Amino acid sequence: MIARTPQTFRNQHNIDARILHEVEEIDLARRRVRVHQLDSGRAVGWEAFDHLLIATGASPFLPDVSGVEAKGIHGISTLQSGIEVRQAIDQQHPQRAVIVGGGYIGLEMAEALVLRGLAVSLVERMPQVMGSLDPDMGALVSDALRNIGVSLYLEESLQSFDVSHGRVQAVITDQHTLPTDLVILGLGVRPNAKLAAEADIPLGATGGIQVNERMQTAVEGIWAAGDCVESFHLVSRKPFYIALGTVANKQGRVAGINLGGGYATFPGVVGTAVSKVCAVEVARTGLQETEIRRLGWEYVSAKIDSTTRVGYYPHAGPITVKVLAERGSGRLLGGQIVGIEGAAKRIDVLATALHAGFTVQDMIDLDLSYAPPYSPVWDPVLIAARQAAGLV
């Protein structure tokens, strides 16, 4: 446990927090769970419940290819998995690393490994990194990776791993063989909903546990929150899966209030996320173009280049903002930002506008702050909204 120790829970909150205990089965008929103690291997037995909260998180996606279990191959999804990678670098001193997958984990690990002095290659089966961005914005992130020395192998698919004496020697794609000392799998995560599914607790279309706004499942007295559940997208009005700590924290708070006899709801998400590659910040919210087309909506797109501060002010740098809006109504549908320091947190203006159901015209009228150290007179987000408003 990270934020609090079991002793803190016990002494300050009268909560019996048991680490290294795994629930292996949920018995809905008898309202109990079967528990196994991991460090001793001892079966603890059955624990009864009146209410049950399932918060089993997400599981990293592991490719079904030969050699994936070899030493030197690491999936990153938990604090412990990150600690293990750092220990491997400190103790084994690898010189070359290959990252498979160009999402958030892949980008952040690429930066970390470059800063540790490794020669880094990144393999991505799509034409761009950051598949949650539109291709034109993803291309900016690809350039940022190349600028820090990462070798990109785009539109290449992982085939297998070359293994010798139980340790990985190379990553084999459909086009290249990349020698390596260390492999990072950044292929995303999926809801860890197996325990719920085995108990016949309904899952949603995305594979996450289906819950209502109060984080209740379809089974009376059974609740779920965090990366194991399916969320609701406030823009598309469709089921949506997102694995982020911010969302999990809010959902856990709502579930806890309701379990404690109060009343709270979690209305949904708009898919806001930020990351960075050294000096380049990356942010997105709402829908991207492929998602909008899939919904059959007509839309307009506006992309502008500006600066993070007034151009004459020291340390002003480039920022690119893209805004997507519904044709006709002008309703904001999504936004993406790539730029240097001061760029990414501007996505919060767009995320707030999405929650409020703003049009791009509504955004133009926002009374945003201005001073030369922080923004041009027209903030880049508003410039993009103004351009989009002229197209709807």
Image: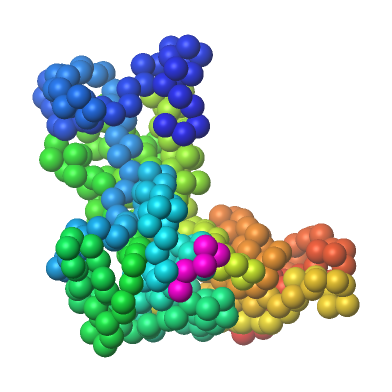
- Residue, x 38% and y 57% (percent of image)? 92
Based on the picture, tell me whether residue 118 belongs to the magenta stretch. Answer: yes
Q: Above or below — where is 346 with respect to 216? A: below
The answer to whether one can see residue 285 in this image is no
Q: Is residue 378 left or right of residue 62?
A: right
Residue 158: quadrant of the picture: bottom left
| Residue 215 % position (x, y) | 37, 37
Based on the picture, tell me whether residue 223 belongs to the magenta stretch. Answer: no
Of residues 391 and 63, the one drawn nearer to the viewer in this rendering: 63
Magenta extent: 115-119
- Residue, x 52% and y 67% (percent of image)? 117
- Residue, x 47% and y 12% (percent of image)? 11
Q: Above or below — where is 349 with respect to 124? A: above
Q: Is residue 388 left or right of residue 253?
A: right
- Residue, x 36% and y 71% (percent of image)? 98
Residue 79: quadrant of the picture: top left
Q: Above or below — where is 35 with respect to 105? A: above
| Residue 280 % position (x, y) | 62, 71
* Colour mode of the rendering: rainbow
| Residue 54 % position (x, y) | 29, 34
Numbered marks: total: 0
